[in-house]
């Protein structure tokens, strides 16, 4: 670790105070390398793996440099001075959480803009006036087209995880957004690779950029240990998953599909290991609630699809488990980068069935990961070493309402009830069949009163048969 301090790197006193209150005293290598250049207003290209502390590497200079611009009270509705683009709403939210305490030291305002929710609050914040916007590209461009946001006053632009934006197909939108910012502004771009068109962004929008790599030997990512655990059957794999999830530290389990992520989180919770899921089928409030539970430690196991591989930036994740090996090596690296963050050590386990051995070996070669596979069971010593202390059994919450007849579904009981209430304004007309208004007894096995069968000319028996089926279909989507 360098002997440099945030003070000797030129970080202003108000920000030093904020960092000290958070217990952040010594800068990481990427911060030592980049802060002198970013604080001086230079364009910077940061290359390397995640988990290096780059969020502070760009939020500190953004706040420090914009504080001078705001001295004259330049805040104008819909015209921020700073812009940070991120590929996912999870990452955007976490960048904002890091940024806001720094911005508050100068009375600056920041807001987060992303899709999947109503734009009303985001528009209201822009109209009130904000200094820094943290955004995903799609919703940002939508608000620009509607005239709620203008980028002609932007002085500093940051592109975080530009290669992931490329993977998601955002580069055309990002290019249009950058074209809308003044050409003389400072630009900082962070990316693990420069393929898929990222190099074109660098060549077009960065001027005399300074290159900094975060892959040196002293990078925190070097503290990551890789394991391949081979099992002989699906049942042995299930037992191994439950064993590895049973420790006391934070761990992330990666699945290939949304359905399997949701199913595994439920199974672990029912077996006494509280778990939450994170995938594309969740609403924004559900995503926020699950990620917050994992971040604050109330739940130690997160079961996720690749949508979260870049979106989860939580320190002290001691174990990443590839329950389903990813399809390509870049996904393996991004998933694995959820551990060994911010100077901590971490382990990465890939569980492999016999039919997966050949593909996994090829994937690891491309990722330049050298690891000797090991045949294990849940009781193997190497498995026990990774589990460490086993967490206490947590009794699952009781199921308040049991499904009846044809009205059941795979959706969680409480989530199903709450979604139905939201969709129907709190009325019971669209609730799952098992949720009935007090004092209004069910008339049949589906739990739906016979009086609700409408007057469409169909027989009551026909209507009762059709309704629960549609309910089940809607709930399972």
Image: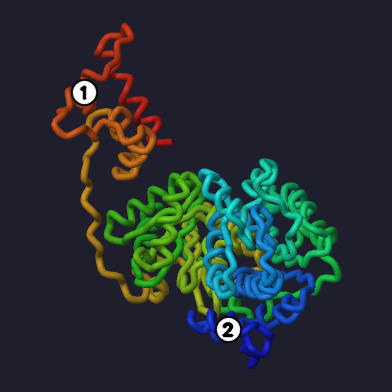
Q: Nearer the viewer, residue 426 or 369?
A: 426
Residue at 58%, 64% (x, y): give it: 109
Q: Nearer the viewer, residue 448 or 405?
A: 448
Q: Is residue 345 left or right of residue 366?
A: left
Q: Nearer the viewer, residue 11 or 393?
A: 11
Provide residue 39's location: percent of width, then percent of height.
72, 78
Q: How far is mark 1 from mark 2, CA to CA?
A: 64 Å
Q: Is residue 65 left or right of residue 343?
A: right
Q: Is residue 362 visible?
A: no
Q: Quadrant of residue 36?
A: bottom right
Residue at 40%, 52% (x, y): give it: 234
Provide residue 157's location: percent of width, then percent of height.
72, 63
Q: Which residue is the site of mark 1?
A: 449
Provide residue 52's location: percent of width, then percent of height.
61, 74
Provide residue 57's location: percent of width, then percent of height.
65, 74
- Disc 1 vs disc 2: which is toward the camera? 2
Disc assigned to residue 16: 2
Determine whether the residue tagged by mark 1 lies in a helix, strand or loop.
loop
Image quarter (top left, top right, bottom left or bottom right) of the C terminus = top left
Q: Residue furthest bottom?
A: 3
């Amino acid at each position: 670790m360098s002997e440099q301090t945030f003070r000797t790197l030129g970080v202003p006193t108000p920000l030093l105070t904020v960092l000290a209150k958070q217990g952040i005293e010594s800068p990481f290598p990427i911060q030592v390398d980049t802060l002198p250049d970013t604080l001086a207003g230079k364009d910077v290209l940061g290359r390397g793996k995640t988990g290096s502390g780059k969020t502070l590497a760009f939020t500190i200079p953004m706040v420090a440099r914009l504080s001078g611009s705001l001295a004259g009270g330049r805040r104008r509705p819909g015209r921020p001075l700073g812009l940070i683009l991120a590929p996912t709403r999870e990452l955007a939210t976490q960048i904002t959480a890091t940024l806001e305490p720094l911005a508050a030291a100068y009375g600056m305002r920041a807001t987060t803009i992303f899709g999947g929710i109503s734009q009303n609050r985001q528009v209201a914040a822009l109209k009130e006036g904000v200094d820094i916007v943290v955004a995903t590209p799609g919703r940002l461009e939508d608000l620009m087209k509607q005239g709620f946001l203008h980028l002609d006053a932007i002085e500093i632009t940051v592109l975080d995880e530009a290669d992931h934006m490329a993977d998601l197909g955002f580069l055309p939108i990002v290019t249009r957004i950058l074209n809308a910012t003044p050409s003389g502004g400072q630009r900082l771009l962070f990316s693990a690779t420069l393929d898929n068109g990222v190099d074109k962004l660098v060549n077009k929008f960065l001027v005399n950029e300074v290159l900094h790599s975060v892959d040196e030997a002293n990078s925190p990512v070097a503290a990551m240990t890789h394991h391949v655990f081979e099992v002989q059957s699906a049942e042995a794999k299930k037992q191994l998953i439950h064993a590895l999830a049973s420790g006391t530290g934070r761990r992330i389990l990666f699945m290939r599909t949304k359905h399997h992520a949701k199913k595994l989180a439920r199974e672990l919770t029912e077996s006494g290991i509280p778990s939450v899921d994170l995938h594309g089928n969740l609403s924004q409030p559900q995503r926020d609630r699950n990620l917050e539970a994992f971040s604050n430690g109330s739940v130690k196991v997160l079961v996720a699809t690749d949508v979260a591989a870049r979106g989860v930036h939580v320190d002290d994740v001691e174990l990443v488990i590839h329950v389903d090996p990813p399809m390509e090596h870049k996904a393996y690296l991004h998933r694995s980068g959820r551990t060994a963050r911010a100077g901590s050590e971490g382990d990465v386990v890939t569980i492999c069935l016999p039919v997966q051995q050949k593909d996994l070996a090829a994937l690891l070669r491309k990722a330049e990961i050298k690891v000797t596979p090991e045949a294990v069971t849940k009781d193997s010593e190497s498995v026990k070493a990774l589990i460490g202390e086993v967490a206490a059994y947590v009794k699952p919450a009781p199921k308040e309402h049991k499904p009846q007849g044809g009205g059941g579904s795979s959706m969680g009981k409480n989530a199903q009830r709450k979604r139905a209430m939201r969709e129907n304004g709190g009325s019971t007309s669209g609730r799952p069949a098992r949720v009935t208004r007090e004092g209004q007894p069910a008339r049949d096995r589906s739990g739906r009163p016979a009086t609700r069968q409408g007057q469409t000319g169909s027989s009551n028996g026909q209507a009762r048969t059709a309704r629960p089926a549609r309910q089940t279909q809607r709930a399972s989507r």
